Image (cartoon, rainbow, N blue to C red):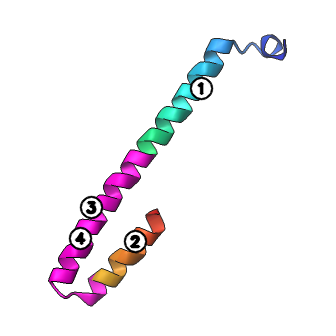
Amino acid sequence: MERNLLNISPQSEVNATDSELAEMLLNKALRDFQKEQILKRIDQSLQDRNKDEFLRLTEELKNIL
């Protein structure tokens, strides 16, 4: 009943929920991609024995998790 007073149809509520879920999914996919890229760069910094780069990248990784 309150939905009708606000001119919000049940379908628009479903669309909003779908949009929120899609946004959450995209955000997770982006975080996963960023994590994988940072992990590759961390591995490279270990191979290069680059301590400064390793420390910087591990901080970056902490920030996205």
Mark 1 closeness class: few <14, some 14–19, many ≥20 residues within 10 Å? few
Q: Range of the magenta residues? A: 28-53
Q: How many numbered discs?
A: 4
Is 56 left or right of 51, judged from the image as shown?
right
Residue 60's tag is 2
- The residue depicted at 39 percent of the width and 69 percent of the height is 61
- The residue depicted at 52 percent of the width and 29 percent of the height is 19
| Dot 4 amino acid type | Arg
Q: CA distance from mark 1 to mark 4?
A: 37 Å
| Dot 2 amino acid type | Glu
Q: CA distance from mark 2 to mark 1?
A: 32 Å
Residue 41's tag is 4
| Dot 3 amino acid type | Gln
Q: Are marks 3 and 4 in contact (CB under 8 Å)?
A: yes
Determine which residue is flagged by label 3. Answer: 37
Q: Residue 1, relative to residue 59: is it above or below?
A: above
Q: Position of residue 47 (x, y in %)?
A: 15, 81
Q: Position of residue 54 (x, y in %)?
A: 29, 81
| Dot 1 amino acid type | Ala
Residue 4's tag is none
Q: CA distance from mark 1 to mark 3?
A: 32 Å
Decide whether the magenta segment is chiefly helix, strand or loop.
helix
Residue 55: name its quadrant: bottom left
Determine which residue is flagged by label 1. Answer: 16
Task: Decide which of tag 1 and tag 3 comes sooner along the chain.
Answer: 1
- The residue depicted at 28 percent of the width and 67 percent of the height is 39
Q: Position of residue 17 (x, y in %)?
A: 59, 28
